[in-house]
Each structure stands twice: as C-alpha cells, then as structure tokens.
Amino acid sequence: MKLKVNASALYIVIVISLVIGIVCAALIATALSYKIHVQQKNRYDRIENNLESAINIALGTPDTAFESGRVFSLFNNQDDSVFLQKKAWGIYTVGTAKAFDQKDTLFRVFSIGNVIDSTKWACLYLADDDRPFLVSGKTVINGDVYIPKANVEAAVVNAIGYEGDKRLIIGARHNSAKMLPTLDAKTLDVISRFFKSPVAESPNLPAGDSLVASFLQPARIFNFSNKAKLLHDDYFAGNIILYSDTTLTIDSTASLKNVLVFARTIIVKNGFHGSCQLFATDSISVGNNSYFYYPSCLSVFRMDSVKNRPAEKITLGNNSRLDGTIITYEKASDAKEPMVIFGNNDKIQGQIYSQGVTRLCDGLEIDGSLFTRLLLFRTGATMLLDYAVNTNINSKLLSRYYLTGKLLPVAGTRQKLLQWLEQN
C-alpha cells in the first residue's frame, strides 16, 4: 500500500525545520555571547581586584619605592601586572595605580594623607617661654594641651574676666618644651625642591578660561618669572604648578582645584573659594570672606637665610575659613619671627603650625590643633603675650576622617586615601 504525501505537509516540515535551525543557532549564539560576557566580567573583576591590591600596596609602602613608577606582577603572573607610582604633591602625596590584561586597563589616581598619631596630638602646643598661658572672655580649650610649666590662669582683659569652663582646659595637661616639635626633614627637602624654578612649558597660560590637567601626564608647569601675575576669570584643576619670583594675585573670580602655587608673595582677593596649596617665601595675604576647601594648605617657607627681608607672614581676613593646614617655617632663625595673623570670626578646621608668633582675634574658632611658639592678642594699642581671648580651640570637633600631611609632627606612619582625583 502506497502512502501519498501532501505537498503542503512537506512545506510545513521544511518551515518547521528552518525554525528549529534558527532557534538552535540563536541558542548557540546566545550561549557563546554569554560565555564571552562571563569571561569579560571575570577578567574585569580580576583587573579590579588587582587594582585594589595595587592601591593597598601604595598605601602601605614608602613613597620612594614607587617614586619613578614601576610595573610589577602581583602573583608572578603576566595576567596580574600592575603599574604603581607615588609622587609628592605639596605636603601630600599623589598615587597612580593601573591594572591591565591585554587591552583592558583600569586606573585610579588618588591623593594620600597620613593618619594622626594620637600620642603626639594636641589641641594646643604652646612653647615654654617662662610665662603662664592666660585665658579670658569666652575662651574654650577642649583637648589635651602642651603648655608652659607656669601652667594656665584666668585673666581679665578690657574689664571682662574669664567666662568659660572652670577647669580652664578641658583635657590633659603636659609640659611643653622651649621649642616646637620639628617638621619632617625629608618632606621639607622635597618641598624645597619644589621651590626651585623649573623649566616651564610656557611663561603664559593657554588661551581660554579653563585648564584641566591629568595626573596621568607630566605636570603642566607655568613660570611667570619676575613678572607680577593676576589670575582671574579662570578655572585651573589637577596637575598644574604655577610659579612666580615676585607677586602672584588670585582674584575671587579665579577657581583653583588641587593646584600648587609657588611665589615670593601671594595675594588672595576677598571672596575667593577653592582648594589649593599655596607656598610663599615672604607672605600670603587672604582677603575677607574667603573659603579654602579641604585639603588646602597656606604656607610660608624660608629655606635660606635672607638679610633685610621682612618677617614671613600669613594673614587671613575677617570671616574667612580654611579646611586644611597653615604652616610657617624658616630654616635659619631670625630676630623677626614668622607670623600667622587671624581676622575676626575666622574658622580653621585642621592644623596650624606656626613656628613663630600666632596673633589671635575675637571669635576665632579652631577645630583641630594649634602649635605655636608664641601667642599674641591685641587690644587697642596693647599687645598681650600668651593670651587667648574669646578663642575656641577644640580638637574634638575635627572630623575623625581628617588626614594630615606627613610634614607635620603629629603625622603617623599609616597612610590612607585622601580623595579620588581621576578614575575610569
């Protein structure tokens, strides 16, 4: 008996076979795509883990080990190679970490700070000049202190007595030495090298109102030499260093982010806002209502003995704020001591290291610490030595996440990530 097959049935079989073939091909393609995706994800995860390992190595290794940058394998495996570099950036350090496998690369650029050594930390360190430390008005000293052996006393200034806590100092008291704890010598040497006039790419800034420089490339260096320079209506961010042998003025219309500035004299106009590290050899003058974001630094360093030059000086205008560090330092002692001069109602969140004189003003608030050889308070035509009047110094209000530069004497050996600068 012969079976007759309808032509339409054969057509249906062909169509079904074609559909099954397409579905099978799609499943195979999907499986292959998934396999490739899983391999890429595993490779990405491995590269990311290697990058995290490189960052941890950077935080746990001395800077000099990777100063020039180095490629190495984490596990003696070519697939686990990383690049690591650490370089000084003012009082802090900038680290660059890259992890790569074939054409895939991940990188992070980050700044590094040091944790505070609690055994060296103090709310106030006032060098012993054989005078008592005197407090008056609404002064608050909250935290451990190092003060002269003559101790602390309440005082009357302008017919107003001390109105604060009866303990005078809310914290442990220790005897201070004649001199302040010293700054880190190696970091001072690094900073002194920064001051040396470099070979600059140009004495003129590029045209335009903004310049952003990557830390993955060599620093963009601009040296204005002995020509006074005014920065205004500009935005500068990243791996940029500005130099001047004379006066450099920063207008309130200029915006700086993570930039280094080196000059003989630096003038910051009223109302400036930004984050930067300023280094001068003579003076820094900051106008009223200015705000330096963390982690900024205002510092005056005099590395050489210079005759007939005025005393180094940092001056803050009224109602100004700085989150970071203030430093005055001179290598050779001089009869004219460096000075830090505050305005009324200034606020500092961080650290002040004043090798010479610190002049206080009404309403000054320091959330952190003050290290100084001498305190000065002016009332009318009278200068009062080692007086604090209506001053609030409170180390308890400093953020527990605050990191210091390794230059400062309270810096611990442990390093931590300060901020992310660049990443992909």
Image (cartoon, rainbow, N blue to C red):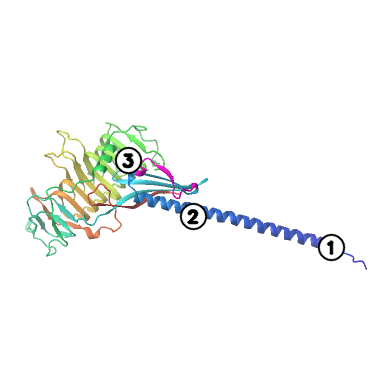
> Which amino acid lies under the numbered mark 1 shown in the image of this protein?
Ser
Mark 1 vs mark 3: which is more N-terminal? 1
In the rendered image, residue 412, in percent from the top left (x then y), is placed at 26, 52
In the rendered image, residue 72, in percent from the top left (x then y), is placed at 43, 45
Task: Tell which residue pokes out farthest to the front in this image.
Answer: 76
SS for tag 2? helix
* Start-end of magenta stretch: 65-78
Give the CA distance from mark 2 to mark 3: 45 Å
> Which amino acid lies under the numbered mark 2 shown in the image of this protein?
Asp
Q: Is residue 421 visible?
A: yes
SS for tag 3? loop
For discs 2 and 1, the disc positioned in front in the rendered view? 2
Which residue is label 3 attached to? 232
Q: Which numbered disc covers residue 8?
A: 1
Give me the residue at 24% from left, 59% from top.
Answer: 397
Give the CA distance from mark 1 to mark 3: 84 Å
Q: Nearer the viewer, residue 206 or 25?
A: 25
Mark 2 vs mark 1: which is more N-terminal? 1
Q: Is residue 254 visible?
A: no
Query: In screen coordinates, is 279 left or right of 391?
Result: right
Q: Nearer the viewer, residue 352 or 331?
A: 331
Q: Which numbered disc covers residue 146?
A: none
Query: In screen coordinates, is 267 left or right of 33?
Result: left
SS for tag 1? helix
